[in-house]
Amino acid sequence: MNLSQLNRILLQTLLIPVVALLFVAGVLALQIRKAEVTVAHMQAASDNISTATRIGQLIVNEENAIRGFQLTGDNVFLQPYSAAQKPLGGDLARLRKGLALQDGDPRMVDDLVLAHDTWHIAFAEPIIQATHNGTDTRDTGLNLRAKAQMDHVIELIARIIYAQQAQRAEAARIWRRQVNQTLEILVALALLIGLAVGINARNRLHQVSDAFQKSLEAVRNNAQLIYESEQRLRTMLTSIGEGIIVCDRSGKVELLNTVAEQLTGWTLATAINEPIDKIFHLVNERTREPLEAPTASFPQLPLTPRAQDGGLIANNPILISRDGSSIPIEESEAPFTDREGKLAGIVIVFRDISEQRRAQTALLATEKLAVAGRLAATLAHEIHNPLDAVSNLLYLLQNNPSPEENAQFLDLASKELDRVSQISRAMLGMYRESKEPVAVNVQEMLESILLLLDVQMRYAQLSLHTDFAPGATVTGYPAELRQVFINLLTNAAESSKPGNTIEVRTEIFVERRRFPRKESRSTGVIITITDTGAGIPVDTLPRLFQPFFTTKGEQGTGLGLWVSQGIVQKHGGTITLTSETDPDNHGTTVAVFLPRGSAVPA
Amino acid sequence: MPLPRRLVLCIDDEVVGLQVRKIILERAGYAVLTAPDGPSGLEIFAEHPVDAVVLDYAMPGMDGGQVAAAMRTKKPEVPILLLSAYVSLTPDITRNVDLYMTKGEGAPILLQKLNGLLTGESN
């Protein structure tokens, strides 16, 4: 039920009794009007009665006056007779009219007038005339007739009065009935209307009450749902395997989940309302400089995740927990907004990558072993062949007295042994690692690697074209860099077909300054390795640097390029790969940039 | 009793190794033909009445296994001794040869094995 429905019900509840009362008033007015008519009837009857009574009085006065005058002959006695004449005419006319109005019979009055006139003409006037003339009027017959006439007149008057009295009584009876009827109607209406209004009001109130109950229930349900939803979200937050911190727009901590509590060393109770950079204290892994708090970028939106990599090289944020221990983490931040779209706070999600780091270290070792394994065949070949030649030469030397031949054999043996020691040195270079970055002569490094790969390339019938910039030097860890280029050259060799050429080129990269001072300075070396193999399909390119991605099936670890990229990035360099699968012009080029760095060549 | 000199074909891409092996075999009384790779070795094998073949496994283009298989289809009776710088060879490869040995075992072993093959004594 909405507000307009409620208002309608309220209006109905108010209007219905008003209308009912108006109806009752109308009925009452009608009844009163009827009673008034009845009362008017009664009034008219009373008037007629009094008029008739007065007429009777006047006629009696006339007769008395005539009798007195008859006896005495004195005109004084005749005075009431004369005085009665005028009002008598008016009263008779009024009575006739009253009777007509009363639905009575006006002929009764006509009869009365006739009887009176008869008496008047036949008795009164002749008596007055006779008495004036001094004639004796004591004629018994005449007087008896006059008396009978007068009696008839009196009777007629009495009859009229009686009829009017009956009418008045009838009107009074009607009036009483009407009053009773009105009372009955009033009581009945009061009962009916009272009941109707009551029932209606009750119904309406029930509706309102039901609606109210429903609203109340809905509110209660909503509250329950909201509570459950919040509980669900809370449970999700706390049981999730990543650390989560929620803070408001001013950077005050609102929530820490269980993992976040463990990693930061703060409990929710102690951390709440604390500034985020106190709880979530981050430093740069390499420089150990504090990183700005996530909220420092407020209110610029959207927030971008911190630059971070897969964790292979040390460039992740370090979380300094409450007890001072350092935990490498990966983290992302997401702002959330209120209903108006204004920034309301920020959610930080992070996880401990220590374990991942250890796994990666193990993977790196594995990959290093895999590289060594791939070189084992080369090693066996390059050691056993010279050994075979040397041992055969020694056999000849033992059984041959010719001095010229001896010298020749010794020379051959010495050259073959040189081969062994070269290979041995190149191989050792893969493992002899320095603690600090050193100056690395790029040409020397590449040549010793190519020596290791020479057999493999020769047997695959690949030719090699090299173009080395003299004096190209970088700073780095030689063994790691060798691993990178063995990987890249092995990839190039394995994707080539017999007869193909692999090109290895180095170029000193000179930074072009906008405002050159003295001279441009070499900033690094770009090493490009180009093969003319089938090329790499475009859809495969983005996955090349992902760990465990390989196109070599069982033969590959899927770690080569991933590790190579990690090592190059650790050296501050970049590795880019371009490939072409066009049937007429296919092949792959890998370009590695390594910075010159500051190490001094030995 | 001077026997007619046995003709041995040596195939190896290692120039020095092949040269030294040739001298040793010649001094042991064999006539020796050499080839630096599989295809030219097969040509010589077809043209000359070779009594035995000393074959290197790892060579560019055509490896020792492929060369041995080709030889077996032509003259299966000619014994083949396979040399390898690798420690182990798969049965697929050794199936087509009579004997195999690892390089570096020394000249006396080589001569002994070759002699065994030619006189029908397998060791």
Image: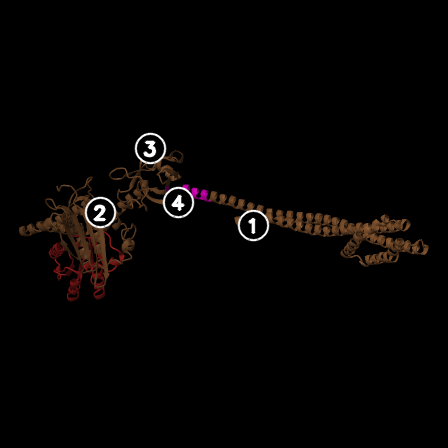
Residue located beneath label 2 in the image: A568
Residue located beneath label 3 in the image: A323
Q: Chain of mark 3?
A: A
The 10 Å Cα crowd at callout 1, few under 14, some 14 to 19, many 20 or more, is few
Going by the image, does A197 lie left or right of A280?
A: right
Amino acid at dot 4: Asp
Q: Secondary structure at mark 2?
A: helix
Q: Disc 4 vs disc 2: which is toward the camera? A: 4
Task: Name the image quarter holding residue A120.
Answer: bottom right
Q: CA distance from mark 4 to mark 1?
A: 37 Å
Q: Disc 2 vs disc 3: which is toward the camera? A: 3
Q: Earlier in the sequence, mark 4 or mark 2?
A: 4
User: Chain A in the picture: what colour?
Assistant: brown
Amino acid at dot 3: Asp
Q: CA distance from mark 1 to mark 3?
A: 68 Å
Q: Earlier in the sequence, mark 3 or mark 4?
A: 3
Q: CA distance from mark 4 to mark 2?
A: 44 Å
Residue located beneath label 1 in the image: A8
Q: Earlier in the sequence, mark 1 or mark 2?
A: 1
Whether residue A119 appears in magenta in the rendering, the answer is no
Amino acid at dot 1: Arg
Task: Please state which of residues A231 and B107 is positioned toward the viewer in this rendering.
Answer: A231
Q: Disc 1 vs disc 3: which is toward the camera? A: 1
* Range shown magenta: A229-243
Residue A189: x and y in percent read 69, 49
Would you say residue B86 is visible in this rendering?
no
Q: Earlier in the sequence, mark 2 or mark 3?
A: 3
Q: Are marks 3 and 4 in contact (CB under 8 Å)?
A: no
User: Chain B in the picture: what colour?
Assistant: red
Amino acid at dot 2: Val
Residue A338 numbered tag: 4
